[in-house]
Amino acid sequence: MTAQLIDGRARAERLKADVAREVKQLAADGIACGLATVIVGDDYRARAYEHRLARVAGELGVPHRRVALPPVSTHDLRSEVHRLNDDPSVTGILVLRPLPAHIHEAEVFRSLSPVKDIEAVHPENAGLLALGVPRYVPSTAASVYHVLDQWLDSVGEDRPAFYHRSLIVVVGRSNNVGKPAVSLAYERGAAVESVDEWASRTGRLGRYTRRADVLIVAAGVPGLIRSEHVREGAVVLDVGINPLRDPDTGAVRMVGDVDTEDVLPRVRAVTPVPGGIGPVTDVWLLRNTVAAARNAPGGRPSSIPAQKDGSRS
C-alpha cells in the first residue's frame, strides 16, 4: 500500500483565506478583534507555538499581545487573566500550555471570561462542547477533523458514510485535545474509543490502536505509534509536537507521536510532523478569535456558520 501524506499547510492556506475575509468584515463593521497569549516560564513548546500564532496573526491583520510572565503564583496568573478579561481590545485569550507544575490549571481556566475563552477550557465552554452545542471548538481537535473531512472530500469518500462505518481511536485524554476529539467523533456518528499512554506501559496499546479505522494520536510521546500499532489501511492523524535536541549541534527539531516512516507501508494516509495538523491549528485559533469578536458585547452575528462538529466545507 502506498500511503498518502496529507498536506496540512495547503489546507491551512485555504482556511486562512476564509479567516482573512472575516477579519476584513470585522473592520468594516467597526468591531475590535485582538488575541492575547499568556506564557508562564520558558517552555520551548509554548514559545514555539506563540511564535507561530504571532506570525499568523500578523498575516491576517489581527492585533496580538504577548504577555510573558516568570513562574508566578496561581493567584498572580489569575489576576493577569482578569485584566485581559476587562480589556475591550482583547477578544480572545489563550493561556499557553504547559503551565509550571505549581500552577492550578483548573483555577486559571475558571478565571477566563467564557466569551474570550477561545480554546473552550472554561467549564461553561467545555460543557457546551460535551453537549454538542459548542461556543468554540478547541483549535487542535477542530483542525484534526477539518483536515480529515477535507481529505475525505479529496479522495471521493462520502463523509457520513465513512464516519458511520468507522471506529475512531483517540490516543491521549487531555482536556484540550483528546477529550474534545472524542466529543467530535460522537457528533459525526462514529464509533469511538479512548486510550492513553498508560496502555503502552503495560504492552496493551496495540490491542486498541490496531482496531482503528481512524487513529488520532495526541499523547505527547515521541514516536509512540509504530507500524505494529496500526491496522492495514488506517488513516492516522498525528497531533504530537515534541521538540528533540541534537546532542552534538544543539539544534532542535519537532517530531510527532507517530513514527511516520515506520507506519507508511501500512496506512492509507497520515499527517506528517511538521506540516500536518499544526498549521491548521494555528489558523483555527485565529478563527476562534474572530468568532469571539462577534460574540463580544456590541458584536454582530458572524458570517462563519456555527459548526457543531468543527468542520467547514
Image (cartoon, rainbow, N blue to C red):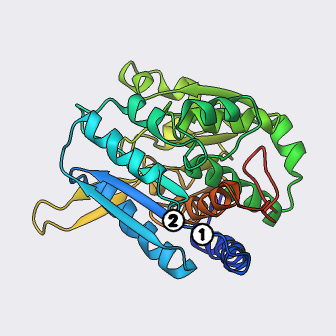
**Vertical order, 306 against 64 (above or below):** above
> From this viewpoint, which residue is outermost toward the top?
202
Q: Which residue is mark 2?
A: 89
Asked whether the residues under the numbered discs 1 and 2 touch, taking CB atoms below 8 Å apart as contact, a structural biologist would say yes
Occupied quadrant, residue 274: bottom left
Q: Secondary structure at mark 1?
A: loop
Q: Amino acid at mark 2?
A: Ser
Q: Position of residue 3 (x, y in %)?
A: 63, 59
Which quadrant: the N terminus?
A: bottom right
Residue farthest along the left direction in this orientation: 248
The residue that disc 1 covers is 32
Question: Foreground residue, 209 or 161?
Answer: 161
The amino acid beneath tag 1 is Ala
Mark 1 neighbour class, 10 Å CA radius: few under 14, some 14 to 19, many 20 or more? many
Nearest to the observer: residue 217 or residue 18: 18
Mark 2 falls on what kind of element? loop
* Residue 280 visible to an observer of this rendering: yes
Place of residue 123 in the rendered image (x, y in percent of width and height, measured from the top left): 56, 30
Q: Nearer the viewer, residue 270 or 194?
A: 194
Q: Residue at x 55, y 59 (%)?
A: 91
Give the percent coordinates (x, y) of residue 28.
Answer: 72, 81
Q: Quadrant of the C terminus?
A: bottom right
Q: From this viewpoint, is residue 259 visible?
A: no
Residue at 35%, 54% in the rendered image: 38
Q: Which mark is residue 6?
A: none
Left or right, residue 3 beside residue 222 = right
Residue ID at (36%, 68%): 51
Q: In which quadrant of the rendered view does residue 245 lie?
A: bottom left
- First-in-chain label (1 vs 2): 1
Query: Residue 129: where, in percent of width, then height?
Result: 68, 35
Separation of marks 1 and 2 at Cα, in angstroms: 6 Å
